[in-house]
């Protein structure tokens, strides 16, 4: 029998975000996600919103922007130790080491240091893998603009920065997802924010959570042509493969983040990307999944259009999960601080179903 995976269990009360799986709705601190994105909310804005009441600078985007800029400069100083350790490791594996290098206590608060470190380390390790020297952060910029600049070595266009901000805001928080739950469990033992964020990253890495968008592109590549869509999808399902970018534990309808990200992807690259083909694959996948799982509606999740946004921003697919982590780190930190303020150690029980030792005579 399959484990229930805590399906339906309420693990915490939170003021941070509400995921309504029946209505396909995501509310971040009283705001609909689609309104936040439509009004041009930046990553710093959403971090300030999430941290309001939990961190000294929370609620003030300008102070958050300044703090994250300082944190990026601090992270730059760690690169001479981090990059030689990269070897042949993948981006998230290097980020695990990088976050592990942050001390628990420091004059700059841990949530700023953790969130500021991720874009600096991600950009540097991607350049390092391509044989290029890292580009120093510019603390006066926002996270999205500085990340793209540090990655490419030249400033990104305003529309690309806006697209990355829209993406980072879209993934900043999402209720009690697996990585956030992991972070809260670690925070509940008072192990500290750095450990909790590192734990969140490790949980995010898996293909059933934040590791899906790279494989979405692999799937589109592999399908290749319109004629191959249905045969490919049917054969994948027959082999017991999961279709990446579809299905969700909570949503019984389409993931609202997919609707937010689809137009963001369509606006990039002057429309010269593979949105039209992706839409055909999407419709076919939903139909095949409905055929195979008639009792469980499986629809598009955030990762499907994430893949197209990040591809149109010319990010290497191996880096998609690391970029997801940059966005989600704002939410992890908010949950950790909320847990530290309000929580009790999270310690559920298990039911033992193994053999008992023979009773002593
Ligand atoms: N492709 C094929 N079959 C699927 C898919 C899928 N994408 N999703 C669910 N199913 C099947 C399951 O195998 C299960 O079948 P079974 O009962 O015969 O074993 C049935 O549909 C019902 O599954 P759920 O209970 O709805 O799935 P669960 O809540 O356990 O898992 C998950 C949710 C992990 C997201 C799953 O849908 C999946 O693996 N999707 C593909 C990976 C993916 O896109 N991950 C990103 C998720 S979004 C995020 O985390 C940011």
Image (cartoon, rainbow, N blue to C red):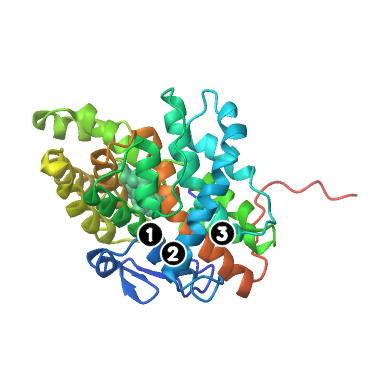
Classify residue 281 as left or right of residue 134.
left
Q: Residue at x 36, y 51 (%)?
A: 144
Quadrant of residue 152 in the image?
A: top left
Q: Residue at x 43, y 67 (%)?
A: 62
- Going from N to C along the chain, the mark reached first, 1 or 3, is 1
Residue nearer the viewer, 246 or 130: 130
| Label 1 element class | helix
Residue nearer the viewer, 206 or 40: 40
- Disc 1 Cβ-to-ligand 1 distance below 8 Å: no
Q: Where residue 90 sits in the image (x, y, percent)? A: 48, 30
- Farthest residue in the right direction? 361
| Label 3 element class | helix
Residue under label 3: 111
Q: Which mark is residue 43?
A: 1
Please say if the residues under marks 1 and 2 sit with CB atoms less than 8 Å apart.
yes
Q: Where residue 63 sits in the image (x, y, percent)? A: 47, 67
Residue under label 2: 47
| Label 2 element class | helix
């Amino acid at each position: 029998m399959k484990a229930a995976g805590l399906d339906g269990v309420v693990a915490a009360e939170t003021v941070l975000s509400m995921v309504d799986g029946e209505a396909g709705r995501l509310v971040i601190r009283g705001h609909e996600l689609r309104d936040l994105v439509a009004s041009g909310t930046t990553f710093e804005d959403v971090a300030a919103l999430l941290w309001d009441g939990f961190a000294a600078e929370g609620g003030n985007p300008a102070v958050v922007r300044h703090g994250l800029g300082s944190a990026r400069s601090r992270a730059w100083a760690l690169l001479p130790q981090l990059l030689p350790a990269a070897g042949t490791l993948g981006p998230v594996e290097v980020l695990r080491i990088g976050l592990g290098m942050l001390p628990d206590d420091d004059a700059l608060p841990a949530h700023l240091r953790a969130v500021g470190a991720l874009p600096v380390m991600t950009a540097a390790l991607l350049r390092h893998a391509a044989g290029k020297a890292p580009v120093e952060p510019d603390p006066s910029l926002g996270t999205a603009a500085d990340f793209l600049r540090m990655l490419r070595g030249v400033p990104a266009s305003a529309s690309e920065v806006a697209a990355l901000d829209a993406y980072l805001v879209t993934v900043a928080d999402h209720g009690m997802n697996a990585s956030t739950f992991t972070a809260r469990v670690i925070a509940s033992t008072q192990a500290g924010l750095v450990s909790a964020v590192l734990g969140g990253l490790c949980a995010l890495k898996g293909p059933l959570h934040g590791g899906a968008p790279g494989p979405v592109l692999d799937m589109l590549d592999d399908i290749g042509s319109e004629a191959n869509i249905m045969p490919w999808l049917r054969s994948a399902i027959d082999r017991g493969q999961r279709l990446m970018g579809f299905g969700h534990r909570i949503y019984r309808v389409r993931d609202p983040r997919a609707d937010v990200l689809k137009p963001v992807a369509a606006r990039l690259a002057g429309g010269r990307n593979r949105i039209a083909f992706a839409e055909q694959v999407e419709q076919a996948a939903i139909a095949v999944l409905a055929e195979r799982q008639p009792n469980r509606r499986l629809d598009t999740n955030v990762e499907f259009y994430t893949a197209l946004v990040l591809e149109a921003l010319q990010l290497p697919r191996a880096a998609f999960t690391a970029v997801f982590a940059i966005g989600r780190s704002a939410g992890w930190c908010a949950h950790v601080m909320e847990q530290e303020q309000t929580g009790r150690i999270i310690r559920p029980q298990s039911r033992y179903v193994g053999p008992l030792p023979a009773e002593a005579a």
